[in-house]
Amino acid sequence: MVDDKPVGDIRVSDVMAEVGKAVKPATVSTEASLKNAVEAIVENSETRKVYVVDSEGKLKGTITLETLLRHAGYLLGVRSTGVTSLLRMLAEISDDKVTEVMGKSVKVLYNEMLVNVTKLMVENHLNDLPVVDNNNVLVGELNGLDILKASRKFWS
């Protein structure tokens, strides 16, 4: 429990246990298409990233919503505005593979000290990070709101 520990002893695992990660991050396999990535991110409203994992669940890369939007713009050009038009446009990108557009993931270990992760997020302007175990298997996503929720007791 986060409340029982000094701030310097809190780990990512403590925050994830306290906040409760009922929703898993959006994921697709390394063989997936961009259409699959769009479907994964649309179905998971709690994330703005899709994590690319291999058959063992090991993290291979990340695709951000921004990357999907830019890629769609490059491929399809300008369309009428509106969320529905945007989602239709993104869904048309069915043949491109996720490995063609994924970026390297900035990730953290499940047992990493929270102070180190917070520093990483602040210094690199990150809102969320994939969390992996010692075998690089994706176990969840930690976001800035999780850290704020867990650190409220220290705000006095």
Image (cartoon, rainbow, N blue to C red):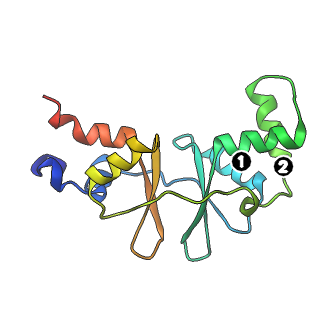
Which of the two labelled residues, at mark 2 and mark 1, occupies the earlier sequence position?
A: 1
**Relative image position of residue 44 (x, y in whole percent):** 58, 45
* Between 118 and 86, the one nearer to me in the picture: 118
**Relative image position of residue 3 (x, y in whole percent):** 14, 46
**Which label belongs to residue 93?**
2
Which residue shows up at 87% across the image and 44% down it? 75
**Relative image position of residue 106 (x, y in whole percent):** 49, 57
Vertical placement of residue 143 versus 16, above or below: above
Which residue shows up at 51% across the image and 41% down it? 46
Instruction: Point out the residue furthest to the top here.
Output: 81
The answer to whether marks 2 and 1 mark residues whose Cβ atoms lie closer than 8 Å is yes
- Quadrant showing the C terminus: top left
Which residue shows up at 89% across the image and 39% down it? 76
Examine the image and state in which quarter residue 96 appears. bottom right
Q: Amino acid at mark 1?
A: Val
Say which element carries label 2: loop
